[in-house]
Amino acid sequence: MDAAEPSTGLVVTGLTKRYGTKAAVADLSFRVAPGEILALLGPNGAGKSTTLTCLAGLLRPNAGSFEWNGRDLGPARSRSVGLIPETPEVYEMLTVWEHLAFVARSCRLPAGWESQAAGLLSRLQLDEQRDTLGQALSKGMRQKLLVTAVVLAGTPVLLLDEPMVGLDPMGQHELREMLAQLRQEGRAIVISTHLLASVESYCDRLLILNRGAAVAEGRLADLVEEHGKRTLEEAFLDIVR
């Protein structure tokens, strides 16, 4: 990107996804600046996962556009957008290290990626599973492997669907530290979660969905104050009701 071009970050405009006559997501628009973490909140069926899968290019929306720094991401956006789904699926017959080698080749990473990959495995306590097949990994280990792969890929936009679920306390701590580092690197990060208690520790802004539409957006403290509540949980329940 030319130095004179503005860093507008991720811009989602008019995202709509219907199943028959029912809209899972309806005319949703939002922005995520480089170096910002947006928490996507909402009750079950609010459209959070649908939003992420459409944004990642895994689900075709009925309408909507996606831009990164003013450039249309288009339908093939896997090099710009990385997704860690709620259910961590990996290649059963590839080892942990072979997964990372596959990512390195697919993303055409420069020489020396092995050092970064080894460091990521160490941070997430996957060193001993380096030569373990995907089919032998627990759910938590699969989650850590996907985190490692997406971070290694270096996409400017990261999407995480319930990333803390399945991780042990140490894994959750390391993931929060990693998110803070990725924020400093200028990544735009969107995290869908039901764990309201943890949102304050790593998110900059909140976007609350209900029945496929945005019903509130802003900084945590502002939303809590605006609704005259003491906690995010109280404000969240008030908003979605």
Image: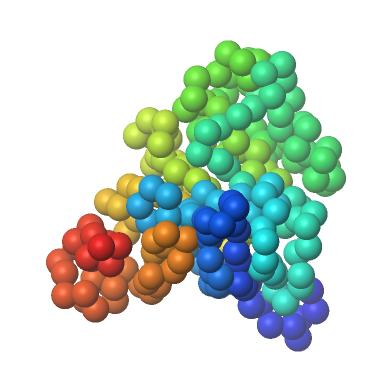
108 left or right, relative to 152: right
Q: Residue 78, can we see it?
A: yes
Q: Residue 51, can we see it?
A: no
Relative vertical location of residue 44 with respect to residue 33 in this rendering, above or below = above
Relative vertical location of residue 103 with respect to residue 133 in this rendering, above or below = below
The quarter of the image holding the N terminus is bottom right
The quarter of the image holding the C terminus is bottom left
Measuring from the top left, give residue 194's x and y in whole percent. Answer: 35, 48
Query: In this view of the protein, which residue sits in the foreground, 46 or 31?
Result: 46
In percent of the image, x 66 and y 77: which residue is there? 7
Residue sitting farthest toward the bottom: 4
In percent of the image, x 39 and y 61: which residue is there? 210
Query: In this view of the protein, which residue sits in the foreground, 86 or 42?
Result: 42
99 left or right, relative to 9: right
Q: Image quadrant of residue 93? A: top right
Label total for image: 0
Relative vertical location of residue 93 with respect to residue 156 in this rendering, above or below = above
Measuring from the top left, give residue 64's x and y in whole percent. Answer: 66, 68
Query: In this view of the protein, which residue sits in the foreground, 85 or 168?
Result: 85
In percent of the image, x 60 and y 64: which residue is there? 16
Q: Image quadrant of residue 114? A: top right
Q: Image quadrant of residue 215? A: bottom left
Relative vertical location of residue 6 with respect to residue 130 in this rendering, above or below = below
Here the colouring is rainbow
108 left or right, relative to 53: right
Measuring from the top left, give residue 83's x and y in whole percent. Answer: 61, 47
In percent of the image, x 53 and y 66: which residue is there? 26
